[in-house]
Image: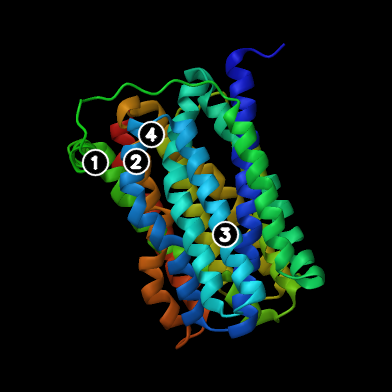
Amino acid sequence: MLTTWRRNATHFLISQNLFVFGSSTVTFAVLWYIALQTSSGTWMTYASLAGSLPAILVSLFAGVWADRCNRKWLIVGASAGVTVLTVLFAIIFLTLDHSLWLLLAISAVRSFGTGIQTPAANALLPQLVPRDQITRMNGLNQIIMSIMLLMSPLLAGWILGDLGIFWIFVVDATTAVLAMLSLATITVEKVARAQGTDSNFAELKDGLSSIWHNHTLALFMAFTALAFILIAPSSQLSTLYVKRTFGSGVWLLTFNELAWTIGASLGGVYIASHKTLKNKVGVIALGFVGSGVSFAVMGLSEPFWVYLLFMGISGIFYPIMQAAQNIYIQETVAPALMGRTFAVLQILSTGIYPIAMLGYGPLADVIPIGPIFVVTGLALVLVGLAFARVLRPAQN
């Protein structure tokens, strides 16, 4: 019979990865549809903005809500709202108006929901499992997530190529309902607030002040922001790069995503095999350096299989880096501030993509994407080395 924490953790992992599966299937389908219809760096910038900017706008307040509310029901409520609005926009797109702007609206709605869900989910995990199981549970989550991300591009490619985009939204709605039902079974208490105030702005200010006055955590966030600005091109422009360089077949886009997710599953296995990560700073730095080298090689003129190989290698490093970042915060930040801290991390990591894409997207319509990958990849290597040099003494 499962102990309470194991049962809670199981239902948490099931729910989160069902969310990931449905959401990533929609994301791949929308990005591929737009890339195949337009072949435009500017439109990919629009897609990136729609998929990330709402999350940035809501994330900081979502962190406050995650520290104030029951995190389980906050996730369920956000998911329910996103599912209803996604289905509504999908019906309009399929029956009344085939404008690409409606697909961007779907991406924006999903981004808004993600901005609410992610800080709450990352802050919820330490409430559900013992401290000595945090590393292992993060690794297990990365493995399952990688499997979901391995399946979702295959499903998206098949549905988009053979059935049509309508069935993408059917899959999304189904997985969302199952995920909410799984999460609703978890028993968890609301975390006691650090200070009694009813002001969102006051609690937001307190959270930001706590990060700013923690010298090590502030440096951690600054390096994270710089690194993800450099990761943005390979993350947001790889679909367009494959189309321009290797062809426009859906199978090429599918293999592009499969290579990354196979690598990511291997990275998750690495994290799960460790009960603890003693040198989290070193692991994060390794993720930056390994990703940078892979991105630089991906930008060179090469056969498609070589590109896929290094896309897969970059996939290995990403979950290792991401899990180590989450564990670092989960083990060092007070529970009452964890939601706000994860909100800042989300903004300075994936949430910074649309800001970066304001430059990278138009640039990709002027010069080839390959050199952008090379330059940003090499710069990311330098950031990784500097990160280790500056933060490793503070860890010790």
Q: Where is residue 387 shown, x and y percent of the image?
A: 35, 47
Q: Residue furthest right?
A: 162
On screen, residue 183 above or below 315: above
Residue in the image at 40% along x and 23% along y: 190
Q: Where is residue 200 shown, x and y percent of the image?
A: 24, 41
Between the C-alphas of marks 2 and 4, the distance is 14 Å
* For residue 258, side relative to residue 360 (left or right): right
Look at the image and tell me whether residue 237 can be seen.
Answer: no
- The residue carrying mark 1 is 200
Secondary structure state at the residue bearing disc 3? helix
| Precedes in sequence: disc 3 or disc 4 | 3
Residue in the image at 63% along x and 12% along y: 3
- The residue carrying mark 2 is 63
**Type of residue at label 1?**
Asn
- The residue carrying mark 3 is 86
Secondary structure state at the residue bearing disc 2? helix
The label nearer to you, 3 versus 2, is 3
| Precedes in sequence: disc 3 or disc 1 | 3
